[in-house]
Amino acid sequence: MRSLTRSLLPALAALTLIAPGASAAGAVDVPPLDQAHAHNDYLHARPLLDALDHGFTSVEADVYPLGDALLVGHDPFQLRPDRTVESLYLDPLLERIDDGGGSVYPGHDVHFQLLVDFKTFGEDGYRRLDAVMRDEKYAGLFTHYDNGTVTEGPVTVVLSGEKPTELVEGQTDRYAFLDGSTGGSIGADPAVVPLVSDDWTEVFSWDGSGDMPAEERAELQRIIDDAHAAGQRVRFWATPDDPGAEREAVWTALAEVGVDHINTDDLAGLQEFLSRSVSAGQPARKLSRTFRTGLSTLVSTRHTDCQVPSSICPPSTGIVA
């Protein structure tokens, strides 16, 4: 990958309560945690960078398209002109991967997920995001779908929220994928829907108090097994997140059945839990993902001896349908 670095836009301290991302060059050397997902990552003092300092391999950003900008924030009143998808996520990821020899975590073969949750105007937002990702400076950064073949890059962008499903499904050349639901998307083509997610409280009644009911444990295992058999990853949100026995019990159950992303706002808490699980003999999950489309099949398997592709085909311009 060419040496490409970019300084982030200066923080407008008088306009924002949360500082934008700073330079990613000074990365903290921490082991990556495959199951760690940062919910509402942008609410942390240093979006993306705090998650990386805790070993997270997946982060979530709520996005509002406004004119030509893709602004990051939970609610419209939180939006700031300097807090964009590019300044908080794409540019620091590019800098970090460039400095790290092609990986978000230098020395590790790590698949990193950026979950973009469009809060409104998803089609307009995606058209803008698609154009941004095709900028030549990002060549080689993103996982790429091209006429039935998926080439894995250091970062995979998955769209959630008000996502433009039909637009994405109709593209033959793209750099983004879709988040589905555990109730209706398991078994969908993972080259389109590699991730299925759901509200924990809508699927299960167990909140971590006492033992998990046997029938709910069996249903959780079925969801995980069916999704993995289809080459998809699984995430639940709205799991207990306050420190305590209930959160510990739910996280333990999720880790035991092999969920791919454990959702949290507590970066240090999940890092400690997953690090403790690994040290106790439960290995970090390594997922073999199968992307299938029509007669063309590519199997992408994550192991320590795999090499992340350092480049992909030069991006074209505009939406390709």
Image (cartoon, rainbow, N blue to C red):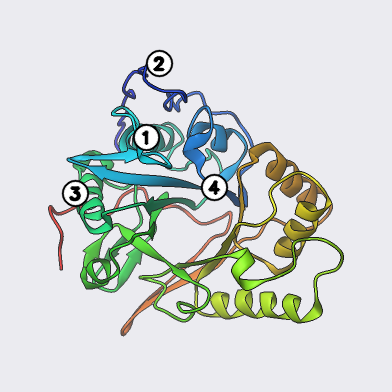
Q: Which mark is residue 85?
A: none
Above or below residue 208? Residue 22 is: above
Q: Marks 3 and 2: CB-CB under 8 Å?
A: no
Q: Of tags 3 and 4, which is closer to the observer? A: 4
**In the displayed structure, does residue 148 sit left or right of residue 47?**
left
Q: Kindly report which numbered mark, 3 or 2, lies closer to the viewer in this rendering.
A: 2
Identify the mark nearer the N-term, 4 or 1.
4
In the rendered image, is residue 113 in sight?
A: yes
Residue at the image position 43 percent from the left and 45 percent from the top: 61
Disc 4/disc 2 C-alpha distance (Å): 24 Å
Cα distance between the residues tagged 3 and 1? 26 Å
Q: Which residue is drawn at the image coordinates 80% and 58% (left, top)? A: 249
Position of 193 with respect to 214 (left or right) is left
Quadrant of residue 156 within the rendered picture? bottom left
Residue of label 1: 77
Badge 2 vs badge 1, beta-carbon distance below 8 Å: no
Q: In this view of the protein, which residue sits in the foreground, 158 or 275?
A: 158
Cα distance in 3D space between marks 4 and 1 = 19 Å
Q: Label 3 belongs to which residue?
A: 131
Q: Which residue is mark 4?
A: 39
Mark 1: amino acid: Phe
**Dot 4 or dot 2, earlier in sequence:** 2
- Name the residue type under label 3: Ala
The answer to whether marks 3 and 1 mark residues whose Cβ atoms lie closer than 8 Å is: no
Instruction: Provide the residue designation for mark 2.
Output: 13
Q: Secondary structure at mark 2?
A: loop
Q: Position of residue 20 (x, y in %)?
A: 42, 26
Q: Earlier in the sequence, mark 3 or mark 1?
A: 1
Q: Is residue 1 visible?
A: no
For the C terminus, the quadrant is bottom left
Which residue is the extreme one toward the left? 317
